[in-house]
Structure formats: structure tokens, C-alpha cells
Amino acid sequence: MKVIIHQPSKFDETATIVDNLKNRKPVVINLETLILILARKIFDFCSGALYALDGQIQKSIKRYFYTCTK
Amino acid sequence: MKVIIHQPSKFDETATIVDNLKNRKPVVINLETLILILARKIFDFCSGALYALDGQIQKSIKRYFYTCTK
């Protein structure tokens, strides 16, 4: 299965990440280059979406997160 | 329809809020008494869940949010 890699630069791009999760695609989120407050906001938004979708989020390396839904 | 009012005091309680949203119950979230950083974290988590569930979030009065799902 194809993994989609997202490297958002602003919060608005988070909707696209969650759209992919809603379509049950595995997503890697790279928050490495963001300021911490924005990285946390995006992480919390995606975590909420994943909880709602019965998905999972795993930290891989620093500020890289692998996510998948059932 | 019965509206459930949540006034979380810690982040762990957010899962219960989202469980109610997953069960399509309308929820009022009262974040008034929380420190801002925690209130934001809970708000972002719930917002992500609501986006995933095609729901809506509306601010009513200061740090009170009315949420519902389809």
C-alpha cells in the first residue's frame, strides 16, 4: 500500500492529512521543520482525528509520525 | 436530544469526549477553568476528531464550545 508523506508548513494543510486518513491511507507526517507550537497543534489535531477513526499514531524518528487507520 | 456537558480537568478525559462524538451525541465542552496550553491541546484534539467525523464545532461564550456530528 502506498504511504503518503506530508510535510505541512501551515495549519491549513492539516485538513488534507486528515482527508487521507479518512480515506484509510497510511500517512507519514513530518513536523521536523515546524516551530514547536505549530507542530504540537498539528499533532494534536491529527491525533484527535485518528482516535475518532480508530487509527494509530506512532513516533518514528524525531517529529516523524507514522499513522494508519483500520 | 440530550446534550452532554464536559468540563475536562486533564487531557486524558478528552477520549471520553470523543467517544461521545463517535456515538453522535451533541457535546458542550467547557474549557473555562483550564490553563491555556491545556485548553488548546484539548480543543485541537476535539477539532481533529470532529473534522474526521464530519462534525462541527461552534464557540458559544468564552471557552465554551458546542459540538455535534452528523
Image (spheres, coloured by chain):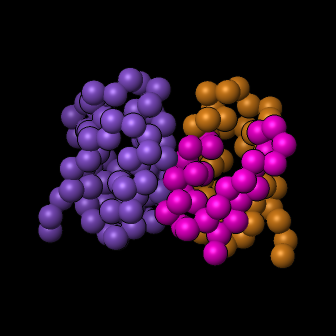
Chain colours: A orange, B purple
Return the x and y of residue B51 as percentages of the image width and height: 48, 58
Find the magenta span and give its range. Answer: A42-70
Return the x and y of residue B48 as percentages of the image width and height: 51, 52
Q: Is residue A48 visible?
A: yes
Residue for point 44% across, 45% down: B12
Residue for point 66% across, 35% down: A39
Whether residue A50 is in magenta: the answer is yes
Q: Residue furthest top?
A: B35
Q: Is residue A68 left or right of residue A48?
A: right
Return the x and y of residue B28 as percentages of the image width and height: 24, 49
Residue for point 54% across, 67% down: A53
Return the x and y of residue A34 as percentages of the image width and height: 74, 31
Residue for point 67% across, 56% down: A57
Quadrant housing residue B10: top left
Q: Is residue A63 left or right of residue B51?
A: right
Above or below A4: residue A48: above
Q: Is residue A69 left or right of residue A44?
A: right
Above or below A30: residue B25: below
Q: Quadrant of the N terminus of chain B?
A: bottom left
Q: Is residue A54 left or right of residue A1?
A: left
Q: Is residue A20 visible?
A: no
How many marks overall?
0
Q: Residue furthest left?
A: B1
Camera-side residue of B7 and A18: B7
Quadrant housing residue A26: bottom right
Q: Quadrant of the C terminus of chain B?
A: bottom left
Quadrant housing residue B7: top left
Above or below B57: residue B10: above
Camera-side residue of B47 and B16: B16
Whether residue B20 is in magenta: the answer is no
